Each structure stands twice: as C-alpha cells, then as structure tokens.
Image (cartoon, rainbow, N blue to C red):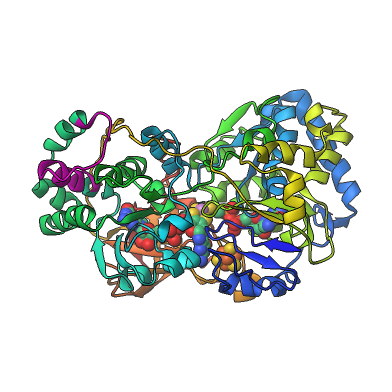
C-alpha cells in the first residue's frame, strides 16, 4: 500500500501504509515538517457535513441545491457559472477530472496561470517542451545555479541532492538558500532577463559558445545592443559578477534550476526563456530544470474532457477580482483552491458573496478561508482517504494512491457526476468510467492502470524531450522596472517551511502578516492603486533597501483582509501569469 503526499510541492514524497517515507530515490527517506504533521492535520478543521447558508444538510440535499442553481443559470447564460481550481491536491481524479462537468455545461473557467504556466510557455517557445533534467540527471553535476529558487525551503528533497555541490544562488535577497550557497548574486526584482542577456553576451563575445543553438546570429546581434555597464546599472549586478557567472557556466558546466516565482515577476517569461538557453550555449543538453509536468505525456486534456467539450470563456486569474467586481459571474464553484485569498482580487469575491451578487460553492476537506464564506460547502476526502493517481512535477514516479484512513465526504468524481445526474446530463464524458479515463490519460507516459495497480509505483517514460538544438528565438523585449519614489518598495513573496500555500494552519497556527524590510518596524500600511492592507513590519538585514518580503503562506492582513486585494492586474506575456513578485507598493506609517 502506497500514499503520495500530493499537494503543490516539487517533491511529491511517497509513503508506505504506516506513513513511513519509502527509501526510493529521490525521496531520500525523510519527511518534511508538513509531511510529519499530515496524520494530525487530517483530524483537524475538517468539513464533515454539507452546509447551505450555514445550515447543516446532507450531501444529497446540497447536490440537489447546486443542481437547481446550475439549471437556473444554464437557462440564462452558462458562462455566468465560473469554476475555479488549483493544485490543493495533484491527483488526476481530484484535480483534473471534475473539469468535465463544467466543460460539458459550457461554464467559464479560470486560466490556471497563477503558478508555473508563464515559464512552461517560455521554455516551450525555445525547446518545443518545458521538460528538463530528471532527478537522476542532477547527480551528474558538481555545480548548480539556483535561479530564483530557494530550494532549501521550497523543495527540501531537491536541496538534499545538492548538499555537496558548489551552489550559486541568484535572488533579490540573502535568504536561507542564498546564505547556505557558496556564492549569492543579488539582483534587482524583475531584472533577471538583463542578467541572463549579460551572461549570454559574455559567452558569445568571448568565444565561449560550445553548443548548437538555432538563430545564434540573431541572438549575437541582439545582445550586442546591450552594454555590460548598462546591464549592471539596471540589474544591480556588477560587470565583474556578470562575467564571473558566464565564466562559471563555461568552466564548471552547472545545472540550472529555475524557480516558478520568476514567472510571476516583471519580464518573467523572457527571463526564464533566456536563462534556459544558457546551458545549451555552453553545450549542456537538458541542462535546466523548471517543471517536468508537461513532459511525461500524461493526457491532462483527456482527463478534462477537452476532446469533446470546452468551457465557454477563460477568465485570467490576474483579472479574477475585476470579473467578479464587474458582475460577470453569478455562481462560483471552487475545488482544490482557496481563491478568496490566493487569487488577485480575492477580496472582490468576498464582497460579492457578502452582498449576494455571487453564490459561492466550495468543495474542500478543510474550512479554508473560501469555505468559511461560502453559501454551499461540501465535504471532500483528503488524499489519505481516497484512491487516486498522483504524479510529480519533478521526479518520474507515478503513484497509485490508496487510502489509509476511512473515507469522509464525497470524492470530486462522485460529486460532479451526481450533480450532472441531477441536472439531467448524460454526456459520454460523465458516463465514461473515471478509471478508464485515467488509464487512457497515463498511457502517453508509458504506463497502464493495471501495471500501476499491481506495482503501486511505476516510472514514467518522458515523451516530450527538449530539442537538442533549441531556438534562440523568440528574443525578449525587456522592460526596465519603474524607479522607486520615496517610501516605495518592491514587494516579493516566498515560501515558509511549515506551510504549503494556505495549508497547515490547523497544525502550525496562523502565520502573522509580517513584512520583512531593511528599515521599517511596527504596524504600517502597504498601498497600491487597488487599496491598502495593514501588516506588521520587521527589520531584517537579509533584505536589501527598497525591498519588502511576505511569506506567501500569510496572505491575510491584520484586519483579516486578503493581501491580494492590492495586487494590480498585470498579465505575463507568455501565459498571462499574474505579476505577484516585484510589485511596487507604498509604505504608509500608521
Ligand atoms: N515549504 C514550502 N514549499 C513550497 C511551497 C510552500 O508554500 N511552502 N509552495 C510550492 C509552490 S505553490 C510553488 S509555486 C513553489 C515556488 O517555489 P520557488 O519558485 O522556488 O520559490 P518561492 O518560495 O516562491 O520564492 C521565490 C524566490 O524568488 C525570489 N525572487 C522574487 N522576485 C525575484 C526576482 O525578480 N528575481 C530573482 N532572481 N528572485 C526573485 C524571492 O526572494 C524568493 O527567494 O514552491 C512550492 N514549494
Ligand atoms: N500574493 C501572492 N499570492 C499567491 C502566491 C504568491 O507568491 N503571492 N503564490 C501563488 C501560487 S504559486 C499558488 S500555486 C497559489 C496557490 O493557491 P491555492 O491553490 O488556492 O492554495 P492552497 O492553499 O494550496 O489551497 C488549496 C485548497 O485545496 C484544498 N484541498 C486540499 N486537498 C484537497 C482535495 O483532495 N480535494 C479538494 N476538493 N480540495 C483539497 C485545501 O484544503 C485548500 O483549501 O497561490 C498563489 N497566490
Ligand atoms: S510537503 Fe512536499 S516535501 Fe513535505 S512530505 Fe509532502 S511532498 Fe514531501
Ligand atoms: Mo505555486
């Protein structure tokens, strides 16, 4: 019997039935603080019954209620039903399958752009795929560049593989990973693309290019335009350090690990695209790692039913609050996500629900911030309580997840199929046996459900390997960050070791909204054109002047307001990813 810790985490650790970590490479046989707390967490803060307007009801009554709501909206305009989801649980049946219902009825969807999609699209533009190095490949290198990747916190098992390597961290601050690295390069927020252009310029102009890259002439002409002095002045990295980094690439041939957070910054996609080219220029094949999720060949589209039906409208997560505020949706259905606080403008959802402009339905195992304000709440089982198939965006083990605790609540599959039945839909997408859908979806990764059920853990065969000779095009068009005025700072976010996004507060307590800055202390307001939030400032010498840092696991301010209420709706150029890192905020003393 095997269980996979299946939340938004690079590592996707694999456990036996007593919840002991399997000593399977690359899991390394240790568990992080979250994994250790899971059995305790499973008994706390659970949604154990269904609720309509705060009244406890049976699950069947809630299903009939939701079906009635859907039927009414379907008569008017299906696009006014919005479903939104993210990666609370990465199971194929939990996360992907429910989409079938919403595609069949022609509802709206959010674009799932919040996290990694900007970098996926950017790397794909150069390599034809975003697939990069496998854990086994990491072993071949003695040097690693962690580019906006605080792995000691955000990916503990990746970090464990790097212990003996020479590590270079490129970040906007001297955090835990940068401190524990052999060299830290501190860059100004949103300027990594300039730094990458500088490295490429040195490699080309010093004749250090050893690998094959298409359209290298265009790239050489492009980087000519930028002087190293200019790059240094924009990025804050000295000409010496830019040259040092380029020479390190030439001499030590490091592997480059690129953090998702970069995709959520100014020039994010362009930066990731250019960074991914550097290994190829020095002759390293598949020398980067970003996310391997789209390389396995798992047919996510099939699971979502896109071969037969599609949603009627895609709403960018960057503009989530705006769509709600403009009154463009009447019903919001949420699973696997806590959008009231994790999406830009989540505060607009809270307001619209309070004023009765939106009916909110939440399917979650826990009383998330969004479940707490919902009109309809339906209990979901956790991954410890249901069967599913789970993959990782780093390693290549596919897992048949089996329950080690009794089922509580209704599974995602059963819920959407029951709603469909009540609405009177008998579309083939909802009639097909869900396990048959899983079997079809994983065949592309070279695995069958039968094999997986008998072996429990099977290694996938990556289908989409990067092109041997990537294309230097598209070339970036980088924008310089706007200069700061008095009392302005660039705000960035990072992961806390005890939480995964908004999860684990029932074990480790609420994380206070603290903004770490170079020189502020006490309660203050952070403001943008969108509004203000009240937080506590703490001086931290690891934060350079002009920067402010908040854990992305404490997204509620001192008054209980979502911090994401102040996020302005910028979209990344490759996949529309919201800009969350490096946004300019005013600091107002109270
Ligand atoms: N413990 C823990 N692990 C997690 C998570 C968690 O909540 N807790 N969340 C998971 C999820 S959802 C994700 S998406 C990943 C994210 O994992 P990562 O992308 O590895 O990193 P983050 O923790 O988001 O931290 C972002 C880092 O980027 C730096 N940074 C910000 N702006 C810039 C910039 O412009 N340039 C450079 N060079 N650096 C910049 C910040 O200082 C910070 O160190 O982690 C996953 N792992
Ligand atoms: N300001 C700012 N905002 C951010 C970020 C940032 O850095 N700064 N980071 C962004 C990033 S990278 C991400 S990935 C998002 C994350 O945003 P979310 O996906 O909203 O974050 P989670 O806290 O993981 O919420 C997942 C929800 O899924 C529920 N869940 C867990 N397991 C199951 C299950 O089996 N079934 C169902 N139905 N539900 C389940 C959990 O209880 C939780 O309520 O936040 C983003 N928001
Ligand atoms: S949260 Fe991540 S690192 Fe921790 S046990 Fe789960 S998969 Fe492993
Ligand atoms: Mo994420």
Give the vertical position of 362 relative to 479 (above or below).
below
Residue 242 visible (yes or no): yes
Residue 569 visible (yes or no): no
The magenta segment:
196-216
Choose top left, top right, bottom left or bottom right for residue 309: top right
Give the x, y percent position of residue 44: 73, 71
Counting labels gives 0
Give the x, y percent position of residue 149: 39, 59
Choose top left, top right, bottom left or bottom right for residue 543: bottom left
The residue depicted at 82 percent of the width and 55 percent of the height is: 51
Quarter in which the C terminus is drawn: bottom left
Q: Is residue 171 left or right of residue 222?
A: right
Quarter in which the N terminus is drawn: bottom right
Q: Is residue 589 magenta?
A: no
Give the x, y percent position of residue 58: 90, 53
Give the vertical position of 430 relative to 34 (above or below).
above
Pick whichever, 304 or 187, lies toward us.
304
Pick whichever, 240 or 549, lies toward us.
240
**Where is ligand 3, by quadrant?**
bottom right
Q: Is residue 198 magenta?
A: yes
Give the vertical position of 567 relative to 441 (above or below).
below
The residue depicted at 57 percent of the width and 56 percent of the height is: 8
Give the x, y percent position of residue 77: 71, 25
The residue depicted at 9 percent of the width and 49 percent of the height is: 229
């Amino acid at each position: 019997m095997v269980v996979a810790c299946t939340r938004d985490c690079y590592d996707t650790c694999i456990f036996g039935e007593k919840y002991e970590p399997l000593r399977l490479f690359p899991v390394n046989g240790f568990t992080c603080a979250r994994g250790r707390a899971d059995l305790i967490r499973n008994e706390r803060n659970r949604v154990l019954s269904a609720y309509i307007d705060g009244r406890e009801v049976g699950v069947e009554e809630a299903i009939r209620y939701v079906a009635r709501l859907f039927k009414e909206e379907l008569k008017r305009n299906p696009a006014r039903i919005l479903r939104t989801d993210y990666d609370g649980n990465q199971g194929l049946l939990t996360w992907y399958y429910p989409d079938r219902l919403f595609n069949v009825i022609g509802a709206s969807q959010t674009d799932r752009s919040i996290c990694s999609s900007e970098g996926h699209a950017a790397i794909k533009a150069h390599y034809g795929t975003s697939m990069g190095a496998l854990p086994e490949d990491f072993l071949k290198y003695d040097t690693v560049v962690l580019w906006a990747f605080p792995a000691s916190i955000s990916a503990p098992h990746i970090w464990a593989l790097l212990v003996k390597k020479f590590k270079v961290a490129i970040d906007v601050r001297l955090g835990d990973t940068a401190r524990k690295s052999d060299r830290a390069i501190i860059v100004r927020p949103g300027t990594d693309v300039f730094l990458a252009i500088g490295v490429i310029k040195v490699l080309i102009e010093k004749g250090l290019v050893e690998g094959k890259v298409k359209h290298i002439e265009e790239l050489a002409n492009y980087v000519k335009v930028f002087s190293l002095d200019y790059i240094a002045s924009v990025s804050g990295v000295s000409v010496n350090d830019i040259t040092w980094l380029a020479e390190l690439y030439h001499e030590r041939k490091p592997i480059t690990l690129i953090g998702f957070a970069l995709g959520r910054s100014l020039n994010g996609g362009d930066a990731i695209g250019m960074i991914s080219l550097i290994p190829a220029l020095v002759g390293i094949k598949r020398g980067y790692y970003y996310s391997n999720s789209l390389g396995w060949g798992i047919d996510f589209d099939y699971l979502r039913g896109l071969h037969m039906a599609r949603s009627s409208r895609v709403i960018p997560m960057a503009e989530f609050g705006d769509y709600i505020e403009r009154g463009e949706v009447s019903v919001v259905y949420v699973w696997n996500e806590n959008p009231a606080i994790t999406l830009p403008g989540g505060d607009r959802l809270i307001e619209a629900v309070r004023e009765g402009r939106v009916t909110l339905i939440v399917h979650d195992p826990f009383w998330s911030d969004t479940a707490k304000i919902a009109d309809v709440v339906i209990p979901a089982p956790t991954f410890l309580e249901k069967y599913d198939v789970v993959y990782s965006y780093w390693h290549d083990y596919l897992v048949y997840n089996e329950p080690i605790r009794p089922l509580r609540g209704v599974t995602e599959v059963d819920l959407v199929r029951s709603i469909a039945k009540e609405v009177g839909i008998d579309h083939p997408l909802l009639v097909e046996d869900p396990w048959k859908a899983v079997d079809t979806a994983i065949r592309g990764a070279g695995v069958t459900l039968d094999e997986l059920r008998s072996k429990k853990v099977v290694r996938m065969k990556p289908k989409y390997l990067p092109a041997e000779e990537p294309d230097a095009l598209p070339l970036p068009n980088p924008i310089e960050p706007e200069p700061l005025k008095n009392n302005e700072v660039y705000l960035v976010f990072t992961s806390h070791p005890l939480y995964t996004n908004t999860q684990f507060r029932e074990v480790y307590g609420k994380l206070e909204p603290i903004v770490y800055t170079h020189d502020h202390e006490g309660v203050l307001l952070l403001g943008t054109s969108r509004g203000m939030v009240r937080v506590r400032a703490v001086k931290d010498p690891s934060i350079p002047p002009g920067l402010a840092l908040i854990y992305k696991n404490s997204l509620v301010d001192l008054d209980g307001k979502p911090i994401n209420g102040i996020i302005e709706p910028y979209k990344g150029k490759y996949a529309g990813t919201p800009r969350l890192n490096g946004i300019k905020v005013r600091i107002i003393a109270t």
